[in-house]
């Protein structure tokens, strides 16, 4: 999968990010929960939610809006 949304359980910001991704009409993406995954917690910690473009090795960290996401997808 090209896009991944890194998030945590019980994360209101992550829920908001999912709404923004829907508004931006992001193509299919995987959700990856970083909880209890030491390497991901070390990398993303308090930065979640983070949208990652695995193909181009880029990340978009919160806060973002639909316009920022659409620009990121280009």
Image (cartoon, rainbow, N blue to C red):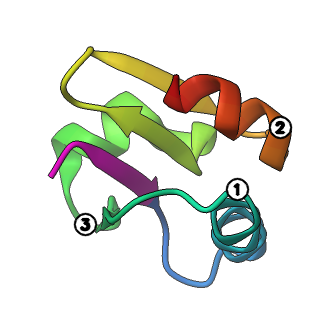
Q: How many labels does the image show?
A: 3
Q: In which quarter of the image is residue 24?
A: bottom right
Residue in the picture at 80% in, 48% down: 66
- Of 40 and 32, which appears nearest the observer? 32
Residue in the picture at 25% in, 66% down: 36
- Of 40 and 49, which appears nearest the observer? 49
Q: Quadrant of residue 29?
A: bottom left
Q: In this view, does 58 lie to the left or right of 39?
A: right
How far apart are the alpha carbons under marks 1 and 3? 29 Å
Q: Pointer 2 and pointer 1: residues touching (CB < 8 Å)?
A: yes
The residue tagged 2 is 67
How far apart are the alpha carbons under marks 2 and 1? 7 Å
Q: Nearer the viewer, mark 1 or mark 3?
A: 1
Q: What element carries label 2?
A: helix
Q: Pointer 2 and pointer 3: residues touching (CB < 8 Å)?
A: no
Of labels 1 and 3, earlier in sequence is 1
User: Residue 59 at what x, y percent from top left?
Assistant: 46, 24
The residue tagged 3 is 36
- Of 60 and 67, which appears nearest the observer? 67
The residue tagged 1 is 24
Of labels 2 and 3, earlier in sequence is 3
Q: Within the magenta stretch, is there residue 22? A: no
User: Residue 49 at what x, y percent from top left?
Assistant: 59, 51
Residue in the picture at 77% in, 75% down: 12
- Of 15 and 38, which appears nearest the observer? 15
Q: Which of marks 2 and 3 is in front?
A: 2
Q: In this view, does 23 lie to the left or right of 56?
A: right
Of labels 2 and 1, earlier in sequence is 1
């Amino acid at each position: 999968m090209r896009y991944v949304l890194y998030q945590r359980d019980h994360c209101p910001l992550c829920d908001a990010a999912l709404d923004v991704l829907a508004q931006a009409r992001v193509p299919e993406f995987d959700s990856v929960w970083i909880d209890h995954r030491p390497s991901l917690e070390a990398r993303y910690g308090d930065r979640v939610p983070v949208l990652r473009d695995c193909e181009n090795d880029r990340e978009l960290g919160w806060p973002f809006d639909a316009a920022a996401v659409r620009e990121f997808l280009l």
